Amino acid sequence: MLYPADAADSLDFTALKAMVGERAATPQARRRIEELQPEFRWEAQAEELERTDQMLTLYQQGHFLPAVATADTASALTLLRVREAVLSSEQFMALKAQTESYQNLYRFCGLHRASMPAVVRLLERTPPVDEVPLWIDKILERNGEVKTSASKELATIRNTLSRKRTAADRVFYKVLRRYESEGWLGDIRESVADDRRVLAVTASYKNRAHGAFHGSSSKQSLVFLEPGECLEVNAEVALLREEETKEIRRILKALTAQLAPLREPLMASAERLIDLDFLNAKARFAFDEGACLPTVHRYGKGQDRRIPLPPVQIAQGINPVLRRVQAGRGKPVVPLQLTLGDPHRLVVISGPNAGGKSLALKTLGLFQLMLQSGLLVPVHPSSAFRWVEKILVDIGDAQSVENELSTYSAKLSKMKQLLVHAGPGTLCLVDEFGSGSDPDLGSALAQVFLKKLHESSTLGVFTTHYNAIKALAGSLPHATNANMAFDVNTFEPEYRLHVGSPGSSYTFEVAQRVGLPKALLAEARDALDGQTRSVDQLLVTLQRQRTTLDRTQNESGKRLRELEQLKADQEGRIAKLEDKLERVGSANAEVADRLAWGKRFEAAAKLYAASKGPKARQEVLQEVVKLFAERAGRAKKDEKKAETKAQQAQRIRLEQLWALPVTRGDKVRVLSGGRTPGELLEVKKDRYLVRLGNLSSWMDRQQFIPWNEKI
């Protein structure tokens, strides 16, 4: 339930739908987006949210849906059910474009089946009608003209027609040259009238020329003459053209009859094409706006509603409508941070006018409408929402001239509805709570309303300027105050929501800022009772302290980040020095080892030189051979031992990646394939068919890793 009927407009949902509709290619998908309404049954929207989320994930991986055909096939599909109907060439080409577009989309979704199974489930019962483009291509050219090869009769007619036109042109130009030599033609020489080529004869010579007249120029200075020599051949051309038209109609009629039995599958594929365009628009909007599918808490069937659900948690929420408005002004948008739910089901926001209270309330309401209409929400993925059964809104002036209701009467009528429908599954959003009447009386009645809403366990966000309502929110166990941050030094709003304490309206401070006389402000302060004045001053003081605390916290956080960065830099330098020392030490050890072996070989050489007799030298040679064998064994052992930390880490990483599961359609990185992505086509036990470019090959699992993983 969404109350009242204009709540979507109050929350800027209509403007948001227009933004989503800009991403749709077809008018049918745009119409579906315009007609979006919140769904209050989770089961009716869950799969649509899943599809949109899966398509968004695919876009985030760099894979975008192929273009959707925009050709309108409604008239063609309607005619296919009419007996003896004949589709035009344009209608056939529209059907071809639609079918080919659906073929591409269907193939694309099949390739990415693992990434978006919910989308594939939508399409799998509606395969493309592959015959249609083939049949149409056999008959029509790319420009929609009927091919000469469409029938033997058409080929004969067109060949004869070509010869007759050539003969007609030859006769026409022969007469043109003769008339031109006689000086009978005007400046333009020739023209076309009634689809016949005619000569532009000067009016003074019209009685000398022979042929059929086809009118004259606006000033009567020229008459248009079809030469008598051309009449016979032109008549033959006209008859052949008529025969060509009849044969083309016969061919198109036969093609229409051939397509007629496929009307139902063509209609189904047209509907799926619109479904994909609809999904694409929502996913592209989510991609452009940084949206996601947050966690959604809901009551299940038979669940005890006295047990509260986890709270709504909005992190880094950006209102898309506000972002577009602010972008036009060159200003940023401050993200919304809000927790709503136990222990604080009701939040009362206070603060100065134009400080962002209403924007915070409307952003929450817009997010809830988006989610329950199947749209992803521009918040941080850690955010969480509740699936509510009712959204009750009171924003803006609801005065009705027709019903002769005052603004306050209309607000009371809305409050009555809020009290009737409030409950655990309801979200209430009320702007300027308690306003519209005598401040004391309106505030008193608003306090009663707030107590009743508190007892109903509803979720609610309210904005107010009344101190009594702020005080009540502070005393109720499941309610809390919040304020919009305000720089008391510059008197500029900061648009950040702080939960836990109320805010001042800064009435006197803002009045002083705009230059009202101090005496006037002093008189106004004296008119206030002491309690009201002291409460407002307390709120101003608290706000100032909060601003100072926030500034100190931000400065401390900045300094802490700088120190952490400095620490990281120092650790990096130390690691580099340690690595350098380790490499220098290894190099020194290697040099020392080589020197030791060199001395041993040098000693053997001297011994060999000093040896007398073959037997002594043979013994020295045997010792040298043993020395070489020992050196080779030591080198091999050192090489095995010398596996670097990086090589060891790479080996362990590869073993982890080889253990990851892979399925058909996955994008993979062949270790010997450079930067070219591969595609896993088939899996048979421990063998994998991988396509790399235009080549396919069976591979072992150790020859490739998932594309998105890095070694």
Image (cartoon, rainbow, N blue to C red):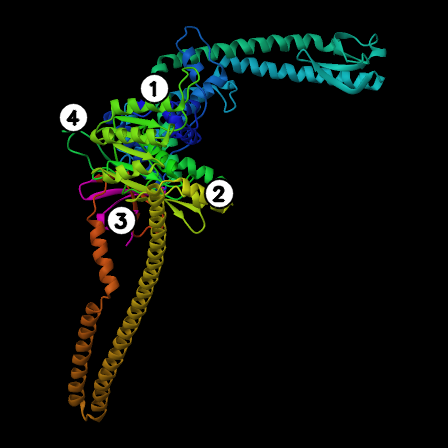
- Identify the disc placed on residue 520: 2
Q: Nearer the viewer, residue 411 or 323?
A: 411
> Along the line of sight, which residue is nearer the eye, 3 or 36?
3
Within 10 Å of disc 2 (Cα), the crowding (few <14, some 14-19, many 20+) is few
From mark 1 to mark 3, how far is it between C-alphas?
A: 40 Å
Magenta span of residues: 684-711
Give the amino acid type for the residue marked by disc 2 in the picture.
Answer: Leu
Q: Write down the residue under mark 3.
A: 704
**Going from the N terminus, do you reach mark 1 or mark 4 first?**
1
* Callout 2: SS: helix
Circle nearer the viewer, 4 or 3: 4
Please, what secondary structure does the residue beneath circle 4 have? loop
**Label 2 or label 4, whichever comes before in sequence order:** 4
Q: Which residue is mark 4?
A: 301
Distance from the alpha carbon under mark 2 to that under mark 1? 74 Å
Residue underneath mark 1: 268
Badge number at residue 58:
none
Q: CA distance from mark 1 to mark 4?
A: 34 Å
Q: Earlier in the sequence, mark 1 or mark 3?
A: 1
Decide if residue 239 is on the left or right side of residue 479. Answer: right
**Cβ–Cβ under 8 Å for marks 2 and 1:** no
